[in-house]
Image: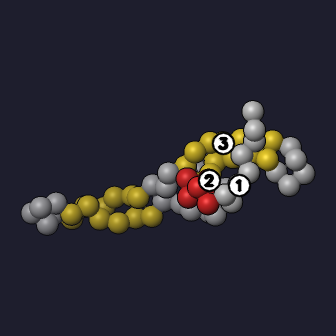
Amino acid sequence: MARVCDVCGKKPVSGNTISHAHNVTKRRFMPNLQKVRVVTENGTPKRATVCTRCLRSGKVAKRVS
């Protein structure tokens, strides 16, 4: 599974872990993705991988069960 949001395209970014002794190692910041059923433009339900920021802001319409 590609760790990319289907709505905004958010994906993992790289950075550093820095210890107290200032040892630096590479790490990845992963987006918080959730698999949800969303309603598409034509009204059919579809499963999508969406980040929690898009869910919270209302960029996707969740399907009502």
N-term-proximal mark, 1 vs 3? 3
Say what secondary structure mark 1 lies in: loop
Furthest-top residue in this view: 65
Q: Badges 1 and 3: C-beta atoms under 8 Å apart?
A: yes
Q: Residue 27 versus residue 65: which sits nearer the camera?
A: 65
Q: Residue at x 62, y 42 (%)?
A: 35
Q: Amino acid at mark 3?
A: Val
Above-or-below relation of 47 to 13: above
N-term-proximal mark, 2 vs 3? 3
Say what secondary structure mark 3 lies in: strand
Coloration of the structure image: secondary structure
Q: Badges 2 and 3: C-beta atoms under 8 Å apart?
A: yes
In the displayed structure image, the side of residue 40 where residue 35 appears, left or right: left
Furthest-right residue in this view: 42
Q: Which residue is mark 2?
A: 55
In the displayed structure image, the side of residue 33 where residue 27 appears, left or right: left
Q: Which mark is residue 60?
A: 1
Give the percent coordinates (x, y) of residue 38: 74, 46
Above-or-below relation of 63 to 58: above
Q: Which mark is residue 7?
A: none
Q: Which residue is mark 3?
A: 36
